[in-house]
Every structure is written in structure tokens, then in C-alpha cells.
Image (cartoon, rainbow, N blue to C red):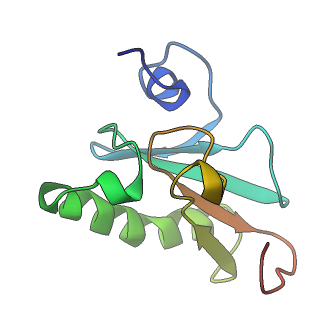
């Protein structure tokens, strides 16, 4: 199975504008942003979709939810940001490596799409 685009960024095989990394996840700027600030937070472990996550993935998923606000704060968003997870092609997922979109920097309306 070939590596996803995100695995290649995580492994340093292709460049990414990385804003955060630790032993469990990596965050980088989206190359096609939908807002002034649009960061992708990706687990190092390749989990294709949220519905593919297992009980053993719970710690990394929880960790990602804990570091997302820290990343938003470090990028000047404070507590005004949105987290989005697209699950599957019909939901808009284009890279099948689970990721959180951290979006902010402008007013966000509801419903989103």
C-alpha cells in the first residue's frame, strides 16, 4: 500500500509548513485553505477514516483534541476556531488519513456546508 500525502509530509519526503509536532501527531498549514487560518492536525499513525479508528486509537484521538486548542492559540486564533473531521468521500474527505481541520481567522457561519 502506498503512502498517503500526509504520511509523506510526516516522513519529510515532501515539504509541509509544519506548525506543531510531537510523538503522536503533526500539524501543518493546509495548501488549499478555506479560511485565513487553516491547519491540518494528523496522527502519525495512518488511520484512514474516523470510523476506522479502534479502541487502541482512543489515546491519540484524545491527544489530538487536547493539542488542537494549543495549536489554535499559538497561531493567534485564541479560543475562536472550528474543528472539522470529514469521514469518507461523501463527507468531503479527499486524503484517507484521518485529520482534524483547525479553521479560524474569520467569522464562521452555521450550518457550514
Identity of the residue drawn at 59% across and 67% down: 84
Identity of the residue drawn at 14% across and 62% down: 55
Q: Identify which residue, 19 or 54, lies in the foreground.
A: 54
Q: Is 85 rendered above or below residue 3?
A: below
Q: Quadrant of residue 2?
A: top left
Q: Residue furthest left?
A: 56
**78 to the left or right of 21:** right
Could you tell me which quadrant the C terminus lies in?
bottom right
Q: Residue furthest bottom?
A: 110
Q: Quadrant of residue 108?
A: bottom right
Could you tell me which quadrant the N terminus lies in?
top left
* Residue 40 x, y percent position in the rendering: 59, 50
Identity of the residue drawn at 51% across and 31% down: 6
**70 to the left or right of 23:** right
Q: Is 73 rendered above or below residue 47?
A: below
**1 to the left or right of 79:** left
* Residue 91 x, y percent position in the rendering: 62, 59
Q: Quadrant of residue 82?
A: bottom right
Q: How many marks?
A: 0
* Residue 12 x, y percent position in the rendering: 48, 18
Q: Is 19 rendered above or below residue 90?
A: above
Q: Is 87 rendered above or below residue 104?
A: above
* Residue 81 x, y percent position in the rendering: 67, 76
Identity of the residue drawn at 41% across and 50% down: 49
**83 to the left or right of 3:** right
Amino acid at each position: 500500500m502506498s503512502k498517503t500525502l500526509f504520511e509523506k509530509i510526516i516522513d519529510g519526503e515532501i515539504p509541509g509548513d509544519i506548525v506543531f509536532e510531537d510523538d503522536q501527531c503533526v500539524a501543518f498549514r493546509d495548501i488549499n485553505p478555506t479560511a485565513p487560518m487553516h491547519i491540518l492536525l494528523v496522527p502519525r499513525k495512518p488511520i484512514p477514516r474516523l470510523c476506522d479508528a479502534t479502541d487502541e486509537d482512543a489515546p491519540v484521538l484524545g491527544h489530538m483534541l487536547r493539542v488542537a486548542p494549543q495549536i489554535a492559540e499559538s497561531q493567534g486564533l485564541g479560543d475562536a476556531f472550528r474543528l472539522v473531521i470529514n469521514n469518507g468521500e461523501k463527507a468531503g474527505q479527499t486524503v484517507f488519513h484521518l485529520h482534524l481541520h483547525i479553521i479560524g481567522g474569520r467569522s464562521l457561519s452555521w450550518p457550514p456546508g
